[in-house]
Image (cartoon, rainbow, N blue to C red):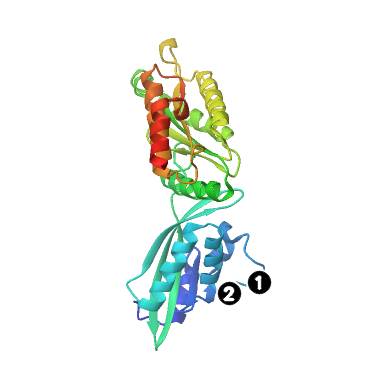
Amino acid sequence: MLPLDPQLFRLFLESLEAPALLLDARGEILFANPAWHLSPRVSSAPDQPWPGQNYLTLLNAAAGGGDRSAGATAEGLRRLAEEGGEGFSQDYFSKGPEAHDYYHLKAWRIEYAGQVVLGVLHSPQLQHDALTGLATRQLFALSLSAELGRARRQKQPLSLLMLNTDHLRTINELHGTRIGDECLIAIAALLREHARRPTDLAARYGGDEFVVLLGDTPGTEARRIAEAMRAEIEDLHIAAGPQYLLSVSIGVADGTPGLRHISEAMLLEAAEVALYRARRRGQNRVVWAQTEPDLLSALLKGLS
């Protein structure tokens, strides 16, 4: 609880570069700062001015459309207004037709002269890896959750690729980290070309690992895409020396056997195990989890 004059707090919010709102205890928007109006995440908002609209109502409407972040945010703000507390924070994933946005929402409860208002700040989180320009692991996790939820509701297939750069340590040792970084940048650019739809997302998962989320894509098509990626990366030939040409190993998993019950963790584990087997079998190859009898059996058992 902050014992501040709401007018002073409004001036503070107005000066911020991050999008911010001032709400009354019922969730009605009293003020939206200039950064809020300029934010890409509100570009598809209704034409009427933000002040006077109820933010909780808007969030609940988004939650009704399957946006779990919106539902959790609405509940957190409602409890903060009704029950009090030090504040409320929530990671918020907003998915638009052109981009995926990752925000950290922070709210404060302010009491002054018997009046209760809420200050809401949307701070953009780090969304893209500095080296490759791909989505971060955090943004990928939120995107996977949102896309899996959409796939369940619309009964559409969903596939996941997990890639590891073969011999990157050796490339770094022989040719230097600058060449190694160039390899990662080149791989990232190629992955981006294969993940251009709004339902797709390519991300850097770790030092030499990448993931590609393919919405509306069955496993058979995902395996074809993965094989095309593998062949194109093999043709890049960035690192000097014929012994260590650039290549990747790829694990493919999809939720088609039981999309209704599959979780993000199960999909990631299936792709990770498939990747591990691709590496053990000589690298520079693609393994699809659904063609591995024990992997498919374990996946189906987890869904039962």
- Say few, some or many: other residues with alpha carbon within 10 Å of mark 2 (under 14 / 14 to 19 / 20 or more): some
Residue 85 to residue 300: above or below: below
Which residue carries the number 2 mark?
A: 53
Indicate left or right for 229 with 123 as reference.
Answer: right
Residue drawn at 43 percent across, 68 percent down? 75
Given residues 144 and 192, the one toward you in this image is 144
N-term mark: 1 or 2? 1
Q: Position of residue 261 (x, y in %)?
A: 45, 46
Mark 1: which secondary structure?
Answer: loop
- Residue 205 visible to the viewer: no
Q: How many marks?
A: 2
Please name whichever residue, 303 or 277, is drawn nearer the observer in this view of the structure.
303
Which residue occupies 40% across, 78% down? 82
Residue 106 position, x and y percent, is 41, 65
The reply to whether callout 1 and callout 2 are in contact (CB within 8 Å) is yes
Task: Quarter of the image for the C terminus: give it.
Answer: top left
Tell me if I can see residue 212 in this picture: yes
